[in-house]
Image: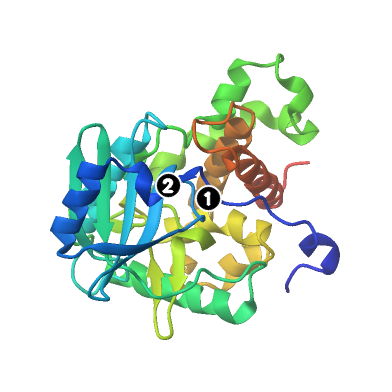
Amino acid sequence: MWPDDEHGAKAPPAAEGSRLPWTAIPAHLRATVERRLGGRVVESVTQPGGFSPGVAVRLRLADGRRAFVKAVGDINPESPDIHRAEARIAGALPTGTPAPRLLGCIDADGWVILMLEDIEGQTPAMPWQAAELDRVLAAMTDLAVAMTPAPIEAPGVAARFNALGRGWRELARSWPVGAARLDPWVADHLDELVALESGWEAAASGATLVHADVRADNILLTEDRVVFVDWPWACLAAPWFDLVAMLPSVAMQGGPQPEEILARHPVASGADPTAITAVAAALAGMFVWLAGRPDPPGLPTVRAFQRRQGEVALAWLRGRTGWR
């Protein structure tokens, strides 16, 4: 069942960072990009979606070929390493992976620049449309099958994320200073939530290469494919991890509630329910905790996005635990 008009009317916050134009990249590095791509850039179109700050542009070359370039300088201290991680993953993904091919990477003079295959497609319509969501969910099944066992080396999920699995613990440390902004149910069950999220690492472990950041803004729909973009967080995890991590954003953006999708999705079939609950607890704690922190540089909308996902994840967790 899809959300009624009352729930769907509340527009989700935009998934956007602070974008810079193609010309923000120093001229000598733009010239290097052109040499690597083998053509002169005659058109650049900035793409607003996604949370990475910096440059994200579709380029058209003089001979008609296209490429997608994302680049970051010093706007956010964490972004250069995130781009480097994406270059390593994208360059290693096997042929046939529904992801853009890496065409090259430049790491020089304080800039990390990725040149990727340009995908002719659109992000899913918002709010989610049933047919498009069905396409994406089917593609996630195919992706999990293709990536099990992982075809490339990657870190485990716990090594990839330093905020996941610590949200409730961080909130408990500040208790009761931050009590005013906590949901009363959270305040009543904070110790139990800390204990529940502590099991997330064992629950989420696995041998599947997961994207680990599947959301509408990281998906492109072409005429015949579903393509998953932005792979810096790829890691080894349980085959259902991508699905579970995506569900709060789906509901926030007008799709079904998490449990409805989980109950019918093949990737979750046979999964240990307690493991999924532990990961849901870790996700909810992360979103609630991060939503109360200052905006990261260059990412003015991310906290609102996390706050809304936290609201969905928390309601989902209440239903799964049955705690009153």
Toward the viewer: 238 or 120?
120
Q: Is residue 293 left or right of residue 123?
A: right
Location of residue 110 by image quarter: top left
- Report which residue position mark 2 lands on: 203
Residue 164: give x, y in percent of width and height: 47, 37
Q: Which residue is mark 1?
A: 274
Question: Splitting the image into 4 quarters, where does residue 129 fall?
Answer: bottom right
Quadrant hosting residue 209: bottom left
Q: Position of residue 317 (x, y in %)?
A: 65, 47
Q: What is the total number of numbered labels drawn onto the structure image?
A: 2
In x, y percent, where is residue 194? 57, 29
- The amino acid type found where label 2 is placed reads Ala
Secondary structure of the residue carrying numbered label 1: helix
Query: Answer yes or no: do the residues labelled 2 and 1 have beta carbons within 8 Å?
Result: yes
Q: Measuring 49% from the left and 36% from the top, which residue is drawn there?
A: 298
Determine crowd level at label 2: few under 14, some 14-19, many 20+ residues with C-alpha closer than 10 A: many
Q: With 192 as the anchor, is 105 left or right in this view? A: left
Element under label 2?
helix
